[in-house]
Each structure stands twice: as C-alpha cells, then as structure tokens.
Amino acid sequence: MREEKLECYNYELCKALMAADIPLEKLNNPVFKQFLTTYTKVTQPTPNALRKVFVIKIQNDIKLKIKNKLHQKVFGSRLIKLPIILKDILLI
C-alpha cells in the first residue's frame, strides 16, 4: 500500500476507534488484529504509533471543527451567534 494511503488508513482507523469509544489497546488483541489484517491486507499499526501521530491530529481536527462551528455566522448585513449543541459538533 502506498505511503499516503497507509497514512490515511491509520488516521481513519484511529478516528473510528476513538469515535466508537474503543481503546486503541484493542489493536493488540490477536484475533482483532488478524481480522483487520486479513480483510484490509494491511499490517496494523501499534496503539503507540497511533497515539504518537494520529490522536493529536484528530484532537486538533475536532478543536478546529468546534472553533469553526462557534465562529460567528453572517446573515444578511448582521453578525449573529447561533446556539450550538456540542453533540452536533463532535459528530465525526
């Protein structure tokens, strides 16, 4: 798998596990790891590798998403703030 696709896969895997509230340590489970490897044909990353690179990126993406949602919106010639529901912002 090309480097860019592998990085994208690792990012999406980490994001999915975090969104589902599945600890990254579950990647150490041999049955789960074999399942992922069999069906993706990709060597699975270690939890530490995901933590070092992708958790920080995902956290920064969520912070940016929150910041953008909370930013003032323009309606006509007036600026108004919209009430934002946090659960709607955090949907990944």
Image (cartoon, grey):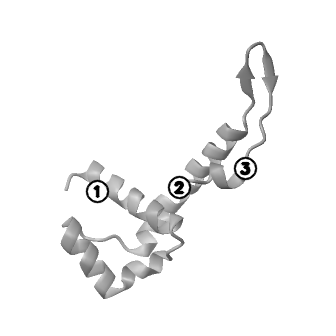
Which residue lies at the image location 48% right of the left edge and 65% below the top edge? 52
Indicate which disc, 1 or 2, sits on the residue closer to the N terminus.
1
What kind of element bears circle 1? helix
Q: Which residue is mark 2?
A: 58
- Give the quarter of the image for residue 47: bottom left
Foreground of the two, 72 or 58: 72
N-terminal-most mark, 2 or 3: 2
Taking 72 as reference, is 65 left or right? left
- The quarter holding residue 72 reads top right
Identified by mark 1, the residue type is Leu
Q: Residue tagged by mark 3?
A: 85
Q: Earlier in the sequence, mark 3 or mark 1?
A: 1
Q: Residue placed at 67% from the left, 39% from the top?
A: 69
Do callouts 3 and 1 mark residues in contact (Cβ within 8 Å)? Answer: no
Q: How many marks?
A: 3
Residue identifier under label 1:
6
